[in-house]
Image (cartoon, grey):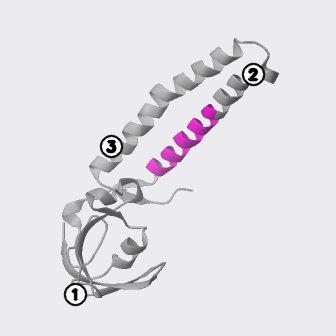
Amino acid sequence: MSSISYYTKEGLKKLRDELSQLKDIERPKASNAIAEARDKGDLSENAEYDAAKEAQGMLEMKISKLEETLSGARVIDESQLDNSKVLVLSKVKIKNKSNGMEMSYTLVADGEADLSAGKLSVNSPIGKGLLGKSLGDIAEIKVPNGTIKFIITDISR
């Protein structure tokens, strides 16, 4: 059973491209590696064969996980999103109440998260704490060191 997750068109394309790469290029490589190792003789003492089979198993597991993710993936129509609340794909400016530090994030699905690019997963503690909040609201977010309070200073697309 797959859960629904929301992606931008670019994020969904990236997932599909990765799946295509794994199926069309990596899968044949894994099969060839197994065939080459099998040709080297006795399989009961062939570490190369065992390693190739294990690598193939890991690859198939990764393909299966990507297929499951894609089966529950939906593209977000950004024109239909409400700017009054923090939602997936919202660009949010927040201010830490204790030290005054301001930060900006775009909330995205797990597969698109990239903190260095300012893309924060909606399933991260901060992402979860911001979802559904409105301009001026205070989000109290539990972190390992306690609770941090953020003021929502801007919401945009």
Point 37% across, 37% down: residue = 17
Residue 14 is situated, as x and y percent measured from the top left of the image, at: 34, 43
Point 46% across, 27% down: residue = 24
Point 30% across, 71% down: residue = 87
Foreground: disc 3 or disc 2: 2
Disc 1 on helix, strand or loop?
loop
Residue 42 is situated, as x and y percent measured from the top left of the image, at: 79, 16
Label 1 to label 3: alpha-carbon separation: 35 Å
Residue hosting label 1: 136
Is 148 colored magenta in this rendering? no
Question: Which image quadrant is residue 126 in?
Answer: bottom left
Label 3 to label 2: alpha-carbon separation: 40 Å
| Amino acid beneath label 1 | Gly
Cβ atoms at labels 1 and 3 below 8 Å apart? no
| Amino acid beneath label 2 | Asn
Cβ atoms at labels 2 and 1 below 8 Å apart? no
* Residue neighbourhood size for the residue with mark 2, other residues' Cα within 10 Å, grouped as few (<14), some (14–19), many (≥20): few
Residue hosting label 2: 46
Q: Quadrant of the C terminus?
A: bottom left
Residue 47 is situated, as x and y percent measured from the top left of the image, at: 72, 25
Question: Which image quadrant is residue 18 in?
Answer: top left
Residue hosting label 3: 13
Who comes first in sequence, dot 1 or dot 3?
A: 3
Looking at the image, residue 73 lies above or below residue 127: above
Cβ atoms at labels 3 and 2 below 8 Å apart? no
Foreground: disc 1 or disc 3: 1
How many labels, in total?
A: 3
Label 2 to label 1: alpha-carbon separation: 65 Å
Foreground: disc 2 or disc 1: 2
